[in-house]
């Protein structure tokens, strides 16, 4: 790094500072949530906070290594890296260790490595590589399917590991496709499908179908003024909508696991189950809600420190912010995350290389998905999906893979002026 | 790279990020600022409010002897959710229960709450406690809670002291101090001085983790308050006298109540049959209470304040002194008596006739009292019989009859001095006169008095015309914090001179009258026997007295139900009691022996 000082000069300071701030705040909050008066030192490596410091140290080393690499390797080796990650996903299915129901861990000594975390940046590299190749066109169905394949292949293996949360993350890549030029109707259709699914879960399916029929008729009568050529598309839209509603009920009743059903029911307010599926969310809301405006203060949180909130140093780490730092602390952390994402988007837009641009959007999309789902879950807005809060949640695989994801982008950006 | 035509989509995506941000900030604002219920829920999760029970106040007698103190006992508590299933054999063995009994108790505790402590075994003995405490670490979810029980070193004064019991729902509704399972004074002094005795509860706020394990004091105990022990009561009771009285009254129904005339302080308060107050404490209370309440001799009845008797001849001084006070007779007025042939009121025995007030009281002459009463009701100063009777009643009531004293003595009955309206209703307006209601003159008929009123009358005579309302407690908290009852000096409507005449009469009762057998050279006594007719069997033997005559230290009233003449039982017991109090020893062991050995229960 001494050799090439320009890397340090060229790198986007906002991204790096936000990254460092989030990692440090995260570490302090892991300390607060797992605090143990017998091991009061934050450096005690027998405790998660001590271990997290080791992970942070490793992450910083990794970040430097990435910055020292030639920026061209990422595009050139994108497919190879992707292939390696798929290989790991297959290997973990064969030899992996099952932790809390998901067979997604390699046990190496006393540390566990989660390849599904690492495959996020690998897939992002491959997707950016594909979409930015000179002859790629969104209009071309074969190309579109190829892009879809790159996204769905790791998703499928992760689903096989029984890690639904991590698999869902890959849906974030739709943002990359959108930026590349995927027609808006796909997004709109996706949003309508989500809306219909929620409605189908909340109300009786035939009432929903009747409502859709009524809306279709009103559109035909008053908006399209009985124009003949609108009949077929409207009819198709109606059939597809009705099909979604019916299939949601079918999937809900016949495909989902009981605990997944309960989680959804709890979220929709159809079930209360405060000692079962609803317990985590309820305790999480109590933790955040009891923080008030200014919070209870560092190490004063009772909900997290005394284990009322489960997974308080991993998936529910945001509770500690909410409880100890209150509304003020929560919005500062939220603003830092969303600020980082917006900054990534802005930096992506200034790239000369389309590969870098699309890779940047992938980073933003994955971070956005994680942040929105994780915090939304702790606030009781979204169902409980076990995915970590980037840079905050305890765990090496997650911290390292987000670091790699981000710093590849930082490296690409710092080299943006060098011609390919 | 050339500008692509989708670059404006950047703004859509940023807009989506911002929208998510706004939504989440709104949600955070709602959860953290608007909805305050989460604070309550968080506190409910983590805070455990532990009540610190204050020590109940102690009760002392006049010489600093303890009448009641507290003893620490231990309750074995259980928090069902924490109970693991180790080998419970040892615990069962120590408590003397079996496995099913163990499970049943856990089940009962769960019915109340899985998370909160319930009593598993009440009041385990000190020995068991010591044993269990050593082993308790093995049994998760169990802990020992100390609490205090009332203890009575001399096992006397049950009626006087009353007892403590668990609060009822209405107690909880009436006073927010009480919570389910708390104790409250149910009767006697425990009840009257409940607020002073109970003290102030303290609070410790502990924090627990999700497994309900103690993790520390909330804010290092900043909001904790200590329990403040209840105030001690300093009574005027003499525990020796009380104990002696209870011994004398064994196997007899009735009561002894004595007061210090100069202060109104009650010296002893015996209702017989009595019971060991320790019986109504702790785990044995329920069973014993049931037994006592169904006993045919009614040991729970407080005969001192709730026994209402026709006062009989002990009322004669009151009647005579009213006649003297109204100047319708004087100390030389003579009335004649034809003995058992007297009409309309007969005399029970023969004596000299005619006779003046001194001999009349000394000999307990009935016709004299009727003549005196007749003189009152024929008093020309007032127009009608009704008015004249009202005057008589006014004076009688000023002597403490017909109303409760309302000091600190629980469940006091007021006795009865009938009103003129009552007679109007009974016989018709203007259709009654001294003849119609002649029984009143000798303390019979409608008139009823409690032993407490009778002893108060004896104190009035001893004091030459005034009294302090009888009360048990002299001071609360410390010996100098006197209760208001100690300063309520009350003058009667009878003059000191006329009262002194009664004192002379009562002195003669011991010199030449019905109690002369109990006179002693050790100290002077004054008294009056009563033999109150009783429709339910033998008359009640009654006696009021005070001693020494020159400077009275004790006034006393003894009632022995259904035992016959006042001179046979009540008088000797009263005399022994006074001797015991004044000289601290008994010089007449033969009388004492007769009294101690007599069994008068079931004689009729």
Image (cartoon, rainbow, N blue to C red):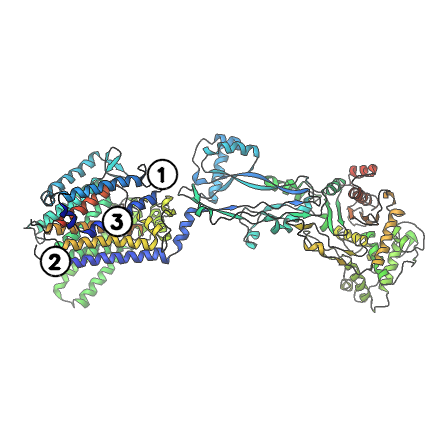
User: Between marks 1 and 3, how big is the CA–CA gap?
Assistant: 25 Å
Helix, strand or loop at label 3? It is helix
Q: Is residue B336 above or below residue A151?
A: below
Residue B595 % position (x, y): 80, 39
Left or right of B587 on screen, residue B42: left
**Quarter of the image that includes the C terminus of chain B:** top right
Viewer-closest of B91 and B33: B33
Decide if residue A162 is in sight here.
Answer: no
Q: Chain of mark 3?
A: A
Helix, strand or loop at label 2? It is loop
> Disc 2, disc 1: CB below 8 Å?
no
N-terminal label among 1 and 3:
3
User: Between marks 2 and 1, how big is the CA–CA gap?
Assistant: 54 Å
Residue B357 % position (x, y): 89, 55
User: Residue at label 1?
Assistant: A39
Left or right of B559 on screen, residue B102: left
Residue A83 % position (x, y): 13, 40
Q: Is residue A299 above or below residue A225?
A: above
User: Residue at label 3?
Assistant: A21
> Disc 2, disc 3: CB below 8 Å?
no
- At label 3, counting other C-alpha atoms closer than 10 Å, the crowd grade (few under 14, some 14-19, many 20 or more) is some
> Disc 1, disc 3: CB below 8 Å?
no
Q: Is residue B319 above or below residue A156?
A: below
- At label 1, counting other C-alpha atoms closer than 10 Å, the crowd grade (few under 14, some 14-19, many 20 or more) is few
- At label 2, counting other C-alpha atoms closer than 10 Å, the crowd grade (few under 14, some 14-19, many 20 or more) is few
User: Residue at label 2?
Assistant: B6
Left or right of B549 on screen, residue A232: left
Q: Chain of mark 1?
A: A
């Amino acid at each position: 790094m001494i050799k090439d000082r320009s890397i340090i000069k060229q790198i986007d300071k906002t991204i790096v500072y936000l990254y460092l701030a989030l990692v440090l705040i995260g570490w302090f909050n892991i300390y607060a949530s797992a605090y143990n008066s017998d091991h009061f030192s934050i450096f005690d490596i027998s405790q998660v906070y001590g271990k997290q410091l080791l992970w942070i140290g490793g992450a910083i080393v990794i970040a430097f290594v990435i910055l020292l690499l030639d920026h061209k390797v990422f595009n050139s080796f994108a497919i190879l890296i992707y292939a390696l990650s798929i290989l790991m996903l297959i290997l973990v299915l064969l030899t992996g260790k099952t932790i809390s129901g998901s067979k997604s861990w390699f046990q190496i000594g006393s540390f566990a490595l989660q390849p599904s975390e690492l495959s996020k940046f690998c897939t992002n590299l491959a997707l950016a590589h594909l979409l930015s190749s000179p002859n790629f066109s969104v209009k071309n169905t074969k190309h579109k399917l190829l892009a879809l394949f790159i996204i769905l292949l790791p998703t499928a293996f992760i689903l096989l590991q029984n890690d639904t949360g991590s698999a869902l993350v890959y849906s974030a890549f739709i943002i990359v496709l959108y930026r590349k030029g995927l027609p808006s109707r796909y997004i709109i259709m996706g949003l309508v499908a989500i809306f219909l699914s929620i409605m189908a879960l909340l109300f009786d399916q035939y009432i929903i179908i009747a409502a859709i029929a009524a809306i279709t008729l009103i559109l035909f009568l008053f908006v399209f003024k009985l124009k003949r050529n609108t009949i077929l598309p409207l009819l198709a839209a109606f059939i597809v909508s009705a099909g979604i509603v019916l299939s949601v009920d079918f999937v809900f009743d016949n495909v989902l696991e009981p605990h997944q059903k309960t989680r959804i029911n709890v979220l929709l307010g159809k079930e209360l189950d405060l000692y079962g599926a609803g317990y985590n969310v309820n305790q999480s809301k109590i933790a955040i809600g009891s923080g008030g405006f200014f919070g209870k203060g560092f190490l004063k949180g009772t909900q997290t420190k005394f284990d009322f909130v489960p997974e308080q140093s991993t998936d529910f780490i945001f509770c500690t912010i909410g409880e100890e730092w209150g509304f003020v602390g929560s919005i500062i952390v939220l603003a830092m995350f969303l600020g980082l994402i917006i900054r990534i988007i802005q930096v992506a837009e200034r790239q000369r290389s389309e590969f870098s641009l699309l890779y940047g959007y992938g980073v933003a999309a994955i971070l956005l998905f994680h942040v929105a789902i994780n915090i939304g879950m702790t606030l009781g807005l979204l169902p409980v999906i076990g995915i970590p809060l980037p840079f905050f949640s305890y765990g090496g695989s997650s911290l390292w893979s987000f670091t790699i994801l981000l710093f590849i982008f930082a490296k690409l950006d710092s080299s943006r002026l060098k011609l390919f | 790279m050339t500008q692509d035509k989708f670059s404006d989509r950047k703004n859509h995506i940023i807009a989506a990020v911002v929208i998510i941000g706004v939504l989440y900030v709104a949600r955070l604002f709602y959860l953290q600022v608007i909805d305050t219920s989460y604070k309550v829920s968080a506190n409910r999760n983590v805070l455990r409010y532990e009540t610190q029970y204050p020590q109940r106040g102690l009760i002392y007698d006049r010489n600093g002897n303890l009448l009641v103190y507290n003893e620490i006992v231990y309750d074995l508590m259980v928090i069902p959710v924490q109970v693991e299933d180790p080998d419970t054999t040892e615990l069962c063995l120590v408590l003397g229960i079996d496995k099913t009994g163990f499970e049943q108790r856990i089940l009962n505790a769960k019915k109340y709450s899985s998370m909160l402590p319930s009593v598993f075994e009440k009041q385990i003995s000190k020995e068991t406690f010591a044993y269990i405490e050593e082993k308790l670490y093995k049994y998760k979810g169990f802990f020992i809670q100390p609490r205090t029980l009332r203890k009575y070193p001399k096992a006397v004064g049950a009626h006087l002291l009353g007892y403590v019991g668990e609060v009822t729902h209405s107690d909880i509704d009436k006073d927010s101090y009480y919570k389910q399972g708390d104790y409250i004074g149910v009767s006697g002094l425990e009840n009257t001085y409940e607020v002073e005795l109970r003290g102030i509860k303290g609070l410790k706020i502990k924090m627990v983790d999700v497994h309900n394990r103690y993790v520390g004091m909330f804010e290092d105990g900043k909001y904790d308050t200590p329990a403040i022990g209840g105030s001690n009561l300093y009574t005027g009771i003499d525990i020796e006298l009380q104990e002696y009285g209870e011994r004398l009254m064994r196997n007899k129904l009735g009561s002894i109540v004595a007061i210090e005339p100069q202060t109104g302080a009650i010296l002893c308060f015996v209702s017989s049959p009595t019971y060991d107050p320790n019986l109504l404490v702790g785990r044995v209370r329920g069973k014993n209470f049931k037994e006592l309440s169904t006993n045919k001799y009614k040991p729970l009845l407080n005969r001192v304040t709730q026994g209402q008797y026709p006062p009989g001849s002990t009322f004669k001084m009151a009647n005579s002194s009213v006649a003297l006070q109204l100047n319708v007779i004087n100390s030389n007025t003579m009335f004649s008596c034809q003995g058992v042939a007297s009409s309309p009121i007969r005399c029970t025995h023969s004596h000299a006739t005619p006779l003046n007030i001194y001999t009349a009281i000394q000999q307990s002459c009935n016709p004299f009292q009727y003549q005196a009463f007749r003189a009152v009701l024929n008093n020309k100063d007032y127009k009608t019989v009704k008015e004249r009777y009202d005057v008589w009643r006014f004076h009688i009531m000023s002597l403490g009859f017909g109303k409760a004293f309302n000091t600190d003595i629980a469940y006091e009955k007021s006795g009865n001095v009938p009103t003129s309206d009552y007679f109007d209703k009974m016989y018709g307006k203007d259709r009654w006169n001294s003849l119609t209601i002649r029984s009143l003159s000798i303390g019979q008929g409608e008139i009823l008095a409690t032993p407490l009123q009778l002893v108060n009358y004896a104190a009035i005579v001893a004091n030459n015309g005034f009294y302090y309302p009888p009360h048990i407690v002299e001071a609360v908290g410390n010996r100098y914090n006197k209760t208001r009852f100690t300063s309520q000096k009350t003058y009667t409507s009878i003059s000191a001179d006329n009262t002194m005449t009664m004192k002379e009469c009562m002195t003669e009762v011991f010199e030449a009258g019905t109690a002369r057998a109990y006179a002693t050279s050790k100290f002077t006594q004054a008294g009056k026997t009563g033999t109150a007719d009783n429709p339910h069997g033998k008359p009640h033997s009654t006696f009021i007295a005070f001693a020494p005559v020159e400077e009275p230290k004790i006034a006393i009233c003894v009632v022995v139900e259904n035992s016959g003449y006042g001179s046979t039982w009540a008088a000797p017991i009263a005399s022994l009691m006074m001797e015991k109090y004044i000289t601290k020893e008994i010089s007449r062991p033969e009388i004492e022996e007769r009294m101690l050995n007599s069994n008068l229960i079931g004689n009729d």
